[in-house]
Image: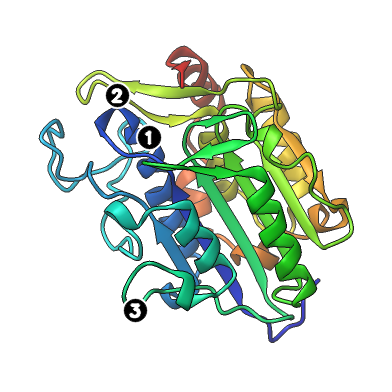
Amino acid sequence: MGAADGKKWIMLVAGSNTWDNYRHQANVCHAYQIVHQNGIPDDQIVVMMYDDIAHHKNNPYPGNIINKPNGPNVYPGVPKDYTGEDVTPKNFLAALKGDRCAVKKRNPKVITSERNDTIFIYLTAHGGLGGFSFPNSTLYARDLIETIKDMARDNKFSKMVIYMGSCHSGSMFTTLPDNIRVYAVTSTKAEETGYSCYHDTVRKISLSDEFSAAWMRYTETNDLKNKTFRDQFSDLQEKIKSSCACRFGDMKVGDCPISVFLNNTPQRVQEKTRPESILKFLYDFVSHMSLT
């Protein structure tokens, strides 16, 4: 486990825009609400999303974004650290490694992590073999892995966890070393496509995807001090039916309690979310899927 005085850093990235891709920004907004309610301060959270759906002309509820059927509005309070044309692979990598000079933005928020800190990264969008899509460009696996390796050499973290939800996401981490304290989980194998879920008949879009819906529900309904990333991965394997979640890198990091990275979900949130029937969750989950 990391040092007691280390900071917890979070980076949340939606790599798409337009109304049809509603689910990706909804995922990031929901993820922000989770880490925020868990007590991680905004100055240790970096959010990248285009921010074009909350007030989109197709949104029947302006200013409202939901991530599950009849769910709460997850848009309020979400930081606007990188929006619009600032959502790029170059800015993502620069912000991740704390290189303000490389960010194409005035007064950018970046991760200024040190050797005792943890970093949790969540990325959600479309993807292809060896690439994760941004609105107007692509993050390539080789650039992501090289940045992570550089950060490890520079002692920029004690441990890092990366969750990536996209088609072909397994292809992004095939060269991730297993000895640099980095653990990655993907929604699919390298050759697989992923599936969205929770089709909303009013908004006429999908609200989430299998992978994101499953990991966030697990996080909100469990005591994270007593659950590890390995436990969560087992749950993902059980819940995701249309693709195969994969893991890469340092499996020892996967044995860490999730709270080491995300703090613990408040008891009131666990109690509020847990009564939702698991059977109903699974029914909604698999009954409203479409190809991403």
Q: Which mark is residue 212?
A: none
Closer-to-camera residue (2/146): 146
Task: Determine whether, in the image, residue 281 is placed left or right of residue 115.
Answer: left
User: What residue would you read off at disc 1?
Assistant: 23
Residue 239 appears at what percent x and percent y? 64, 26
Residue at x 81%, y 71% (from the top left corner): 1
Query: Disc 1 versus disc 3: distance between alpha carbons?
Result: 29 Å
User: What residue would you read off at disc 2?
Assistant: 205
Closer-to-camera residue (100/28): 100
Residue 139 appears at what percent x and percent y? 54, 45
Image vertical order of residue 212 relative to residue 199, above or below: below
Residue at x 46%, y 22% (from the top left corner): 292
Task: Determine whether, in the image, residue 162 is placed left or right of residue 22.
Answer: right
Mark 2 and mark 1 lie on one chain; the one further toward the N terminus is: 1
Q: Amino acid at mark 3?
A: Asn
Examine the rendering and report whether any part of residue 225 can be seen.
no
Residue at x 87%, y 56% (from the top left corner): 252
Image vertical order of residue 188 relative to residue 223, above or below: above
Q: Nearer the viewer, mark 2 or mark 3?
A: 3
Query: Disc 2 versus disc 3: distance between alpha carbons?
Result: 35 Å
Q: Amino acid at mark 1?
A: Arg
User: What residue would you read off at disc 3?
Assistant: 107
Residue at x 43%, y 57% (from the top left corner): 32
| Helix, strand or loop at mark 2 | strand
Q: Residues within 10 Å of mark 3 (few under 14, many from 20)?
A: few
